[in-house]
Amino acid sequence: MKSRFWLCAIAAGMLAFSGANMSAQGRGHDKDKGNGNGNGNGKKGDDHGSFSDHDRDEMRAWVSANQSHLPPGLAKKDRLPPGLEKQLVVRGTLPPGLQKKIVPVPVELERRLPPPPPDCEHVVIGGHIVLMNRRTSVVLDIFHVEL
């Protein structure tokens, strides 16, 4: 009888705790939604290693403005062959064939983007602007440059 009492008490405590935890959701406690405490500014992708909608708009605008003189890695002639293109995936590790094709993002574009997360960098790979972890070579996000 005592064990049944304690089992019910523990279950009730767990339910009460999980209910309190769930009710906190949706009340501005999510860092990514910009709740006014300086933890995020409402842009999708902040602090998670991905491009926000604003970042993508900035990249589109920069490519459009510089389309007549794109740097190496972004020009039409620098596109990846289909076999290598398939290997460039989000959350995937860059194979050696793609690691050899990495080019730094142009300084003018880098200035328009927010700083990358720690240990990450913006790079260009065969017509794509890529956010990648420089230590592990894991691709965090990809922006395909349309020409």
Image (cartoon, grey):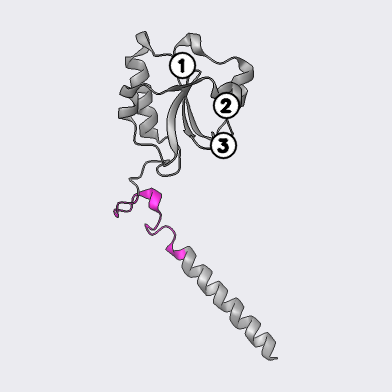
Answer few, some or many: residues within 10 Å of disc 1's Cα (few below 14, many 20 plus, some between 14 and 19): many
Q: Is residue 89 left or right of residue 61?
A: right
Q: Which residues are magenta?
A: 23-39
Residue hosting label 2: 88
Q: Residue furthest bottom?
A: 1
Q: Is residue 86 magenta?
A: no
Answer few, some or many: residues within 10 Å of disc 3's Cα (few below 14, many 20 plus, some between 14 and 19): few
Residue hosting label 1: 73
**Amino acid carrying mark 3 in the image:** Arg
Give residue 91's mark: 3
Q: Is residue 52 left or right of residue 98?
A: left
Q: Are marks 2 and 1 in contact (CB under 8 Å)?
A: no
Label 3 secondary element: loop
When the figure is inspected, residue 129 is found, relative to residue 137, above or below; the finding is above
Label 2 secondary element: loop
Using the rendered view, name the quadrant where residue 104 is placed. Answer: top left
**Amino acid carrying mark 1 in the image:** Gly
Q: CA distance from mark 2 to mark 3?
A: 9 Å
Instruction: Point out residue 82 in the picture as x, y percentages from the top left corner.
Output: 62, 16
Q: Quadrant of the N terminus?
A: bottom right
In this rendering, the count of numbered labels is 3
Q: Is residue 97 left or right of residue 60?
A: right
Residue at (36% x, 28% y) in the render? 57
Q: Quadrant of the C terminus?
A: top left
Of residue 11 and residue 112, the one placed in the foreground of this image is 112
Magenta stretch, overall SS: loop
**Amino acid carrying mark 2 in the image:** Leu
Q: CA distance from mark 2 to mark 1?
A: 14 Å
Instruction: Point out residue 84 in the picture as x, y percentages from the top left corner.
Output: 61, 20
